[in-house]
Image (cartoon, coloured by chain):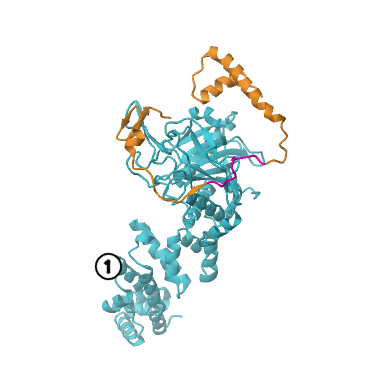
Chain colours: A orange, B cyan
């Protein structure tokens, strides 16, 4: 698997990362090198082997349905560049 | 579903008849106290960002821990949809950017949902019923809310809803008209409310629909579909489908083609319009969420939940028809809300089921609707209505008096049996008293008596006079019989 220049631009856009035209070619090379590296795993025969989801065999932890959090609007918006009445303020995004 | 095409459901175009094909994705908010992956409250409303934990705000280092009740609710819903329950499911990240999605991804289920194929039996107003296939149900997080009208240059973001558990219920494209689509959502809502897994409150956004609509000539393969996002009332679902189907038919009949896209329904303008900005975002780059292990449980867990399920609408309807002798229509009306069904059963217990159903549906529901009451706030209790039905059954009051009595109980309250006595509402069944009234009227109206022999429909006039003379309390059957005998009418 390898990516072309168009795919590089598309991935950058989907990730909302600004990539200038002269960065596309170097990035394409880097991404393809990474993909080639990972592709070595394709040589391993995994027929009939369940994908491993955890290093230690354990079940998913669950919580009881209780309200144990919240009521900390000050802390929630503390790092926001702009707030009003505990709302986050962002540049207008309207369809 | 391979039912034959019903010509009545086709839409007439300029050139052909068109079949509309509809599939739906319903987002149902799970009834739970806290969120899917955090301990913040799910309560509706609240001050901005007050029901938010650091997990919901996607602060670095925060980890999701699943709410076991949300899992149980999804399984209960799956059971209610007669669906396959998957003992192992996986949470994935659905990646997209929007200011009310602080994580930059929604935790959802993609390849391995918690619930697989099921079905919903949908009754249509004409008495027909259809089976709608359910493709899957999965658990996912809700996003926050953006307000755009507070400020000319900025949007306000409130994360109170962020992380609340939703069930996305995906139907197969089995629906063939806006009417079927509305009936499907109505039925699904009833099932969810019976199960107690979603309150179905569409005004508060607890139930929202994405509607996939395409059109085709009968017998053709499926046409290209458009998805109408976030329709939030059953009426609008119907309108959106009609509008969108006609838009597509007009384009195709003009020689154009439909492009697959996401659209919004504007009920004010009665049109759907393209959400162009969303088109590119369809690349969600799903991958398994590394913060969450697969969700696994055994059949014993599912069985225990199945054990605790209430009687569901279809079973209740069948039982009402079977044990109370109700018509399918009446049974359907009574079971639409669990509270109505419970009320009816309280009235019908130990009484005539049909009489109880008539009083609940015709008198009580009619009155509740008119006054904007729900069954929960009914001024007439099931015990009071039951007593009225008893009084009719015992012949103490006539059906007509019963309506007056119902009025009194509705507006003033009180025990019906005592009211009948204290207000002298007991019907007169004493033939002697009725006969006296009848004789008096006959004696005073010799001309009418003569006419009645020629024209038996005049009997109605005599009945009216007798009822008036007895203050409406005479037993109508006795009055009729006596008058017929005395006037010599067959």
> Quarter of the image holding residue A50?
top right
Looking at the rendered structure, the secondary structure element under dot 1 is helix
> Quarter of the image holding residue B221?
top right
What is the chain letter for disc 1?
B
Q: Residue at x 54, y 12 (%)?
A: A22
Name the spot of residue B141 as percent of width and height, x first.
48, 41
Q: Which residue is mark 1?
A: B412
Region of the chain picked out in magenta, as a range: A50-60
> What is the quadrant of the C terminus of chain A in the image?
top left
Query: How many neighbours does mark 1 have within 10 angstroms: few (below 14), some (14-19), or many (20 or more)?
Result: few
A53 is within the stretch colored magenta: yes
Name the spot of residue B476 as percent of width and height, x first.
38, 77
Residue that protrudes farthest toward the front in the picture? A56
> Quarter of the image holding residue B304?
bottom right
Q: Residue at x 62, y 36 (%)?
A: B223
**Residue B76 appears left or right of B429:** right
Q: Establish if B319 lies above or below B281.
A: below
Residue B214 or residue B114, whichever sits in front = B114
B94 is within the stretch colored magenta: no
Residue B428 or residue B23, whichever sits in front = B23
Name the spot of residue B21 as percent of width and height, x first.
59, 42
**Residue B425 appears left or right of B255:** left
> What is the quadrant of the N terminus of chain A in the image?
top right
Marks counted in the figure total: 1
């Amino acid at each position: 698997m390898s990516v072309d220049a168009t795919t590089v631009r598309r991935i950058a856009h989907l990730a909302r990362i600004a990539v200038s035209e002269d960065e596309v070619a170097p990035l394409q090379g880097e991404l393809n090198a990474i993909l080639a590296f990972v592709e070595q795993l394709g040589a391993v025969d995994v027929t009939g082997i369940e994908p491993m989801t955890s290093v230690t065999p354990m079940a998913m932890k669950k919580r009881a349905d209780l309200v144990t959090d919240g009521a900390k609007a000050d802390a929630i918006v503390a790092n926001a560049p702009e707030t009003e009445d505990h709302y986050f303020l962002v540049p207008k995004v309207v369809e | 579903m391979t039912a034959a095409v019903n010509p009545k459901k086709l839409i007439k175009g300029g050139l052909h008849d068109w079949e509309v094909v509809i599939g739906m994705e319903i987002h149902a908010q799970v009834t739970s106290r806290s969120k899917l992956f955090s301990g913040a409250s799910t309560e509706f409303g609240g001050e901005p960002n007050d029901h938010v934990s650091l997990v919901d705000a996607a602060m670095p280092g925060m980890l999701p821990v699943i709410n076991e009740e949300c899992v149980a609710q999804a399984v209960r819903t799956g059971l209610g949809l007669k669906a396959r329950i998957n003992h192992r499911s996986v949470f994935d990240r659905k990646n997209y950017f929007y200011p009310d999605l602080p994580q930059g991804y929604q935790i959802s289920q993609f390849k391995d949902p918690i619930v697989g194929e099921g079905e919903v039996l949908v009754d249509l107003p004409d008495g027909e019923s259809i089976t709608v296939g359910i493709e899957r149900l999965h658990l996912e997080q809700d996003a926050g809310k953006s307000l755009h009208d507070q400020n000319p240059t900025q949007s306000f973001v409130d994360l109170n809803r962020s992380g609340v558990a939703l069930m996305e219920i995906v139907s197969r494209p089995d629906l063939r008209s806006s009417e079927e689509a509305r009936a499907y959502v109505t039925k699904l809502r009833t099932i969810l409310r019976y199960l107690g897994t979603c309150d179905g409150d569409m005004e508060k956004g607890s139930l929202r629909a994405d509607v996939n609509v395409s059109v085709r000539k009968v017998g053709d393969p499926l046409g290209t579909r458009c998805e109408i996002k976030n329709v939030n009332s059953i009426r609008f679902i119907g309108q959106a489908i009609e509008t969108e189907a006609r838009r597509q038919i007009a384009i195709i009949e003009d020689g154009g083609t439909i492009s697959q896209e996401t659209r919004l329904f504007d009920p004010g303008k009665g049109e759907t319009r393209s959400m162009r900005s969303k088109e590119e975002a369809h690349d969600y780059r799903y991958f398994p969420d590394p913060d969450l292990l697969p969700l696994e449980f055994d059949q014993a867990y599912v069985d225990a939940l199945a054990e605790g399920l209430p009687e569901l609408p279809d079973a209740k309807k069948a039982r009402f028809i079977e044990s109370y002798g109700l018509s399918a229509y009446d049974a359907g009306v009574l079971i639409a809300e669990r509270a109505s069904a419970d009320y009816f059963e309280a009235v019908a217990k130990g009484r005539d089921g049909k009489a109880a159903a008539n009083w609940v549906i015709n008198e009580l529901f009619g009155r509740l609707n008119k006054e904007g009451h729900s069954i929960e706030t009914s001024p007439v209790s099931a015990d009071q209505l039951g007593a009225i039905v008893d009084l009719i059954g015992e012949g103490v009051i006539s059906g007509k008096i019963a309506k007056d009595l119902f009025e009194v109980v509705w507006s003033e309250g009180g025990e019906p049996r005592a009211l009948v006595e204290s207000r002298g509402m007991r019907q007169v069944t004493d033939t002697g008293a009725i006969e006296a009234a009848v004789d008096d009227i006959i004696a005073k109206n010799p001309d009418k008596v003569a006419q009645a022999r020629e024209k038996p429909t005049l009997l109605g006039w005599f009945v009216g006079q007798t009822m008036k003379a007895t203050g409406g309390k005479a037993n109508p059957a006795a009055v009729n019989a006596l008058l017929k005998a005395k006037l010599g009418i067959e």
